[in-house]
Amino acid sequence: MNVPRACDLGLIGCDACGKVLQARQHAEHCPRCDAPLRRRKPDSLVRSWALLLSAAILYVPANLLPIMHTVQLLNVEHSTILSGVVLLWKNGSWDLAIIVFVASIVVPLVKIVCLALLLLTAQSGSTWAPRERTQLYRVLEFIGHWSMLDVFVVALLMTLVHFGKFAQVEAGAGVVAFCAVVVLTMLASMSFDPRLIWDQQTDRDAARP
Amino acid sequence: MDTTALVICEHCDSVYRRMPLHHGQTACCTQCGAVLYSNRSLDLDAMLALAVAAMIVLLIANAYPLMQVELGGITRETTLWNIILITFDSKVGLIAVVSALSIFFFPLLQIALYLYVLLPLRLGHVPPAFAGAMHALRQMQPWSMVEVFVLGVLVSVVKLAGVATVSAETGLWGFGVLTLLITALGGFDLRELWDRAAELGE
Ligand SMILES: [Zn+2]
Ligand SMILES: [Zn+2]
């Protein structure tokens, strides 16, 4: 089944309020909500790539640097994100270990890899599985902010564990890098325009005899 | 051409003509599967009740301690603002700023804006700066992270359980309820509020 597309019918939808307008009559701003009217998100690919690459670079220190220093009876322990998961697992809380592992390690990595895949395929004009790629984009949008979990855990622990020489928790530089990775990947997926996946799709359809 | 009966898919730019739906039905894009619109008739009373409840619960959640930790006879209690202030004074001030925005300011502003928009609409007129308030609401939604924070508190409780005696306090229950209320509010489609305001404006 062929569904007409707004760009082919000379229509434009307002991103902010959903109003459908004739592109000819409304050049710049939506008459209902005054948001700028754009066919596609501006510089989607460039912005998304820049944010994604910064996130990928910071992903390295985020995982290698300690996110927390725990001082317990003169014994200092530096924990990274991964060693925090291992500790939870060893202490028998395997359910939480899995949650933290997914939120802090799997989600950011999946986001970076999948967004790079979406960007590459959109850029090269791939016609491969557009529906599935759009669904993948929606999943990425949905899971993005859950990675902030470890940042909040560090903030909570360093506030609560203030018992002088008995026990003390201090934050490490890794948590700042990690926080930046989460914010950057969120911004990167917001800058990506899923309609780009479909633009090439219709061009190919039109080119076919 | 009359464009008011049309709807454009946000994710793939397909154009559809709006059709009447049965109650509880949702119209999805046949191309990419995105939700186009639903027939959950916009219930301003329900939304307003949720927003009022959310505002009260947010104040309670922030006023009472989240949890109590006891080690070697010393007891510590913490509210959200203790966490933000102590974190801000440490070497990692950035995470205090992010936490304050995503757990306190954005949720607070979100609920306040809902109240600001919903109350006049319910009374039959469009509030001043309606468009600005609605744009702010839409942009803030992804950055409000109360639900992630609640999960973070639970993880911290477990991490501490081996070292100290930990107990959950009123504030944590408050944040738990707040998560449910904000999720319910976020389930309403803001685009339907635009349509309602346009009807009133005419
Ligand atoms: Zn608009
Ligand atoms: Zn679609």
Image (cartoon, grey):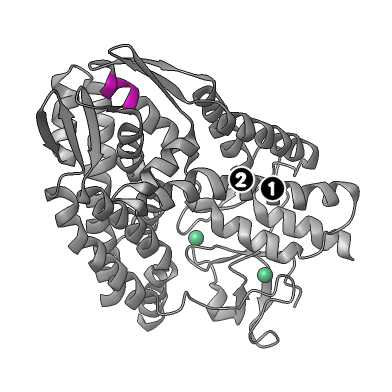
- Seen at 79% across and 55% down, the residue is B196
The response on whether ligand 1 sits within 8 Å of label 1 is: no
Position of residue B133 relative to residue B153, above or below, is below
> Which chain is disc 1 placed on?
B
- Amino acid type, residue under disc 2 in the picture: Leu
Numbered mark located on residue A85 in the image: none
> Which chain is disc 2 placed on?
B
Drawn side of residue B16 relative to residue A105, left or right: right
Other-residue count near label 1 (Cα within 10 Å), few / some / many at <14 / 14–19 / ≥20 = some
Q: Position of residue B160 (x, y in %)?
A: 28, 21
* Residue at the front extreme, as displayed: A164
Q: Secondary structure at mark 2?
A: helix
Q: Which residue is mark 1?
A: B112
Other-residue count near label 2 (Cα within 10 Å), few / some / many at <14 / 14–19 / ≥20 = some
The magenta segment is B156-160
Position of residue A5 relative to residue A165, above or below, is below
Q: Which residue is mark 2?
A: B108
Where ligand 1 lies, by image quadrant? bottom right
Cβ atoms at labels 1 and 2 below 8 Å apart:
yes
Q: Position of residue A159 (x, y in %)?
A: 35, 34
Q: Out of B200 and A88, give the one closest to the viewer.
A: A88
